[in-house]
Structures are given as structure tokens and as C-alpha cells.
Image (tube, rainbow, N blue to C red):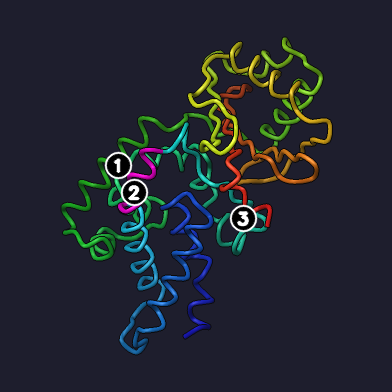
Amino acid sequence: MTDTFTEYRAYVFSIAYRMLGSVMDAEDMVQETFLHWRKVDQAEVNSPKSYLATIVTRLCIDHLRSARVQRETYVGPWLPEPLVTETGPSAEGMTALSDSLSTAFLVLLESLTPTERAAFLLREVFAYEYTEVAEIIGKNEANVRQIVSRARQHIQARRPRFEPSSTDQTALLNEFMQACTNGDMSGLMTLLAEDVVEYSDGGGKVHAARKPIIGAEKVAQFMLGITRQAPADSSVQIGQANGQPALFIYVAEELYGVMTMDVGNGRIQNIYSVINPDKLRHLSA
């Protein structure tokens, strides 16, 4: 029983993380799934993988519904907890579907209801048949088709139209970091799209912009301002988070924030800065 669960643990986590956008909550759902699994007569289970997917999906739907008020009253922009894909739970299992790990994609999923989110992920990301999705979320097949179609249209209408290479992103991150360090306003402006948006998630726990900052000049001024105010013992490293290059910001050798970006047409389109210490605790540990 334990060996079977261990085999699919990374898969269970991959569903939970995409559903919740939280590493710690996803880990809790994995543990809850295991507790449910221990009570099951495996002789009656035809497909452990599908059975576990059903358990964790339903747990996540319930969790999202119960956390609705908390999400609605969140201070400032909400961003997902960064997932370091090389060291996250079974990196191989997570990066196989890395496109659906991006910060931009997970933020878009927040605009769906829990049921829409589950149906869309199961069908479009994890490739379940409509009949299987219907059984997992407790809806009839016709209803599921409508839910998935509606969610797909919603996501496609808002999804970024750019898919740069990892090399392009890393090169821009290096230039971005250099321009900020040197206080190079003109250099920074050449890296930013005219309508670039910066999102800062401090969750009310640390000082952060409580509304998105829009426009190249405003974003450049903001980034140079926080760089000038950075403590002398701060440093920045480039790594991987959510399947894409990311900046890891340290103060006194402790992780202070993680920054990822959307890049397209050779410019930075969106900047996502997670500095809420609660969302970084799993990385610091």
C-alpha cells in the first residue's frame, strides 16, 4: 500500500500544487490523500493513479472553497508560492508539465472557480477523458464539457501570447539584474515592454506595493528605488522556479524574495515578486 502511494506521490503533489498554488498546502493535501488511501481496500481499486487523483482533487476543491474568504481578503496581489523545480517533490514528475507551472498560468487559474479549475486541469493538463473528469468531480459528462470549454476560453483569452526560450529569459534576467545594480535607468527601460506590469506579493507581512505597477517608466523607477534601498548584505542569484529562470534575492544570506518574469518579443512583459515570508518558508527550510 505504501509502495503504491510512493510511486504516485509526485503525481498527487503535481495535481495539488496546480490546484492550490501553494507548496505547503499541496503537501498537506498529499498527506490527507495518503490517510484516505490507507483506508481503501486496494483489491477493489482498478487504477491506483486515477483513484488517488480523485481523492486529491476532491480534497483540493473542498480546501479552495473553505479558503475563499481568505483569498478574497488577501492584502495586495496574490501570487503562487514559488516551486523550485530542481529540488521540489520529484522534480522529474513536476517538470514534465512545466508549462502549467509558470507563475502567469497559476495566476490565471485563480480566476476560475474550484470546480472549473479542477475540470480544466484534469482535462487540459493531465489529459483525462471527459468521462473520467465527470466521475472525479461528480458532474455529468455534458456538464463537464461545458465547464472545460468555458474555462478554456477564459484562460486562452487572457494567457500571454509569448513563449520565449529559457536561454532568452536567463539572458534578460542577467541584463535586468545588472541594470538595477548599476542604477541604469535607460538600460532598464530598453529591457521593459512599454506596458510591463510588476506584481508584488507581500501579503501584508512586509512592505510591498499593494497594487500592480504599470508602465515601463514607473516599473523602472520602482525597481531602481528598491535596489537603492537594499541592505548592504543583500545578494541575488539566478536559479529555477516554476519551470522558468528566476531571481532569488537574499538578505544576510536568508531568502528574502523570488522573482520570475514573462518575456516576449525580447522584452520583459510581466514581473512577479514573491516576498511574503510565509510563502518562502518552505524554501528557507
Cβ atoms at labels 1 and 3 below 8 Å apart: no
Q: Nearer the viewer, mark 2 or mark 3?
A: 3
Q: Which residue is mark 1?
A: 151
Residues in magenta, as a range: 65-73
Q: Estimate the x, y position of residue 135 in percent, counting from the top left.
A: 24, 65
Q: Nearer the viewer, residue 211 or 97?
A: 211
| Mark 3, other Cα within 10 Å: few <14 / some 14–19 / many ≥20 | some
Disc 1 to disc 2: CB gap under 8 Å: yes
Mark with earlier residue (2, 3): 2
Residue occupying the point 36% across, 57% down: 63
Q: Is residue 192 above or below residue 204?
A: above
Sequence-wise, which precedes: disc 1 or disc 2? 2
Which numbered disc covers residue 282? 3
Main SS of residues in magenta = helix
Q: Amino acid at mark 3?
A: His
Q: Secondary structure at mark 2?
A: helix
Q: Nearer the viewer, mark 1 or mark 2?
A: 2
Kindly identify the residue that appears in the image at 55 percent across and 56 percent down: 96
User: Which amino acid type corresponds to the residue marked 1 in the rendered image?
Assistant: Ala
Q: CA distance from mark 1 to mark 3?
A: 31 Å
Q: x, y (%) of residue 200? A: 55, 31
The residue closer to the viewer here, 172 or 247, is 247
Residue type (three-letter) at the residue carrying disc 2 = Arg
Q: Is residue 68 magenta?
A: yes
Q: Position of residue 215 (x, y in %)?
A: 54, 14
Corner quadrant of residue 246: top right
What's the residue at 53%, 55% (across, down)?
A: 23
Residue at (26% x, 58% y) in the render: 130
Q: Is residue 254 above or below residue 32?
A: above
Q: Which residue is mark 2?
A: 117
